[in-house]
Image (cartoon, rainbow, N blue to C red):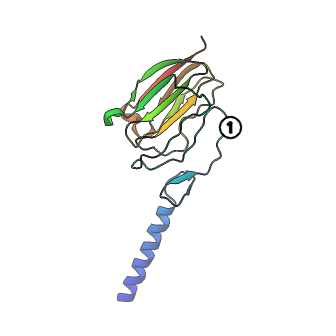
Amino acid sequence: MEESRRRFLAALTAGVTGALAGCGGDSATPTGDGTDTPTAAETPGTDTPTAAETPAETPTATDASTETGGAPAETVAVGPDGDYRFDPESFTVSVGDTVTWEWASGGHNVKPDAVPDGSDWSGTSGTGTYASGYSYSYTFETAGEYEYHCSPHQRLGMVGSFTVSDE
């Protein structure tokens, strides 16, 4: 009886461990320091990711643009005061301007809902979220209306929009 119980528990543990190993949905490679590095190659362009996704509890990542050499035209707070919002929620910049999103609280990402034809903006990389202190910048070269959201909190109203003007 005891031997049957041990085999059952061992099989149950192996099954649960195997099932959990397939969870996550994101293609990432462990780095050995507890973070994952996305394995998809980044596309060259004006989006300049420089850090891996980190768990929301680890405030260490930065994804700042180095191509502009100056201050961003607009800085958006992501989750300020622990709220599910972007601040500002909407704004206007010019073609060639850089927008920087700075995480004031963790567990958020930036994903586009609508972009103008010709734009290759895809928001933050991967499907994960980022920690407080994270920063993501992108230089916009295509004029038009952009709409975006935070995937985990879109239903709570964490959405934003902006216009890139060619004037």
Residue at figure coordinates x 49%, y 21% from the top left: 162
Quadrant containing the N terminus in the rendered view? bottom left
Residue at figure coordinates x 44%, y 26% from the top left: 160
Residue at figure coordinates x 44%, y 21% from the top left: 90
Q: Which residue is mark 1?
A: 44
Q: Nearer the viewer, residue 136 or 39?
A: 136
Is residue 16 shown left or right of residue 65?
left
Mark 1, secondary structure of its residue: loop
- Above or below, 66 against 52 in this view is above
Q: Nearer the viewer, residue 136 or 118?
A: 136
- Above or below, 5 against 119 in this view is below
Is residue 120 shown left or right of residue 64?
right
For the residue marked with disc 1, what is the amino acid? Pro
- Above or below, 61 against 114 in this view is below
Q: Position of residue 163 (x, y in %)?
A: 52, 18
Q: Which residue ends up furthest to the front in the rendered image?
A: 69
Q: Which residue ends up furthest to the top in the rendered image?
A: 167
Q: Position of residue 77 (x, y in %)?
A: 41, 30
Q: Nearer the viewer, residue 125 or 117?
A: 125
